[in-house]
Image (cartoon, helix red, strand yellow):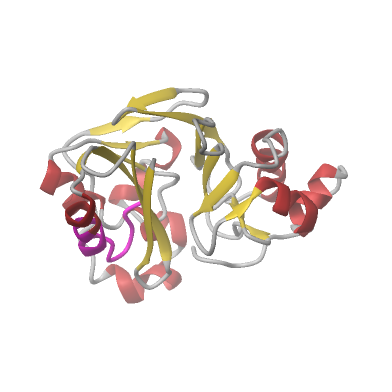
Amino acid sequence: MLIAGFPAGAWGTNCYLVAPAAGEECVIIDPGHQAADGVEEAIRKHRLKPVAVVLTHGHIDHVASVVPVCGAHDVPAWIHPDDRYMMNDPEKGIGRSIGMPLLGELTVGEPDDVKELADGAKLELAGLELSVAHAPGHTKGSVTFGMPEAADIPPILFSGDLLFAGSIGRTDLPGGDMAEMLDSLARVCLPLDDSTVVLSGHGPQTTIGQERSTNPYLRQVAAGQGPARAPRRGM
């Protein structure tokens, strides 16, 4: 298994390229603000052939490079239908005051081929199996992508902005909802094995076991409680 990840752009959003091995087909997860050059560098370095872009949600810091990346490799982009509108109108997802300083630098819109994600779907792409879980709370159309344990590789969760190392995604932007966030954490994250590696939209990797033990939000959800609001990280 090959996972090449790097933080990109003004918000340090993690973009991932995932393939069975170097020299094979790959999936690109969340090519956000100023991610296109990093994507091309990883493709060259590992001799990869992209077959799809998949998106954890529609915020501009996760989708800003979708059009150039999809166009350069003639591949589709997958997004949940509840967040699709943000690809054409990102201000509705983040608020004008937050977005304006950078939105002037961007060319927004949809790539030529957009496919919609559904809760519980199994995507067979590039020789990989990605399990889609609808996880609203950060946005209405947030999803996670899970990969099963294989050989010596533990299970993996690409959590987007649902779960971070030590924290969770913010819920104070349009479409955010703390009650939905807590439900998504309980429904999507708590049932996972402690060995599951969490690759999130911002910050370092972690594991479900680590977060179950130390993340105040996940601990309170497990106890049937919940904090009043989420902190701000990313967008």
Image quarter for residue 27? top left
Q: Residue at x 23, y 65 (%)?
A: 106
* The residue stretch that appears in magenta: 30-41
Where the N terminus falls, by quadrant?
Answer: top left
Q: Residue at x 52, y 37 (%)?
A: 152
Residue lying at the far front in this picture: please name it: 152
How far from the left and from the top, in percent, is residue 96?
41, 67
Does residue 172 lie above or below 87 as drawn? below
How far from the left and from the top, in percent, is residue 177?
64, 49
Q: Residue at x 44, y 72 (%)?
A: 97
How far from the left and from the top, in percent, is residue 111?
20, 43
Instruction: Look at the image and say whether residue 59 sits in the magenta stretch.
Output: no
Is residue 12 toward the left or the right of residue 67 in the image?
right
Image quarter for residue 64? bottom left
Is residue 167 toward the left or the right of residue 107 in the image?
right
Instruction: Look at the image and say whether residue 37 sits in the magenta stretch.
Output: yes
Is residue 177 toward the left or the right of residue 140 in the image?
right
Residue lying at the far bottom in this picture: please name it: 101
Is residue 13 toward the left or the right of residue 133 in the image?
left
How far from the left and from the top, in percent, is residue 26?
27, 40
Viewer-proximal residue among 126 and 217: 126
Viewer-proximal residue among 38 and 77: 38
User: Looking at the image, how many numbered discs can be counted on the residues?
Assistant: 0
Does residue 99 lie above or below 224 as drawn? below
Q: Residue at x 71, y 33 (%)?
A: 191
The answer to whether residue 175 shows anywhere in this view is: no
Viewer-proximal residue among 141 and 187: 187
The answer to whether residue 131 shows anywhere in this view is: yes
Does residue 177 lie above or below 129 as drawn? below
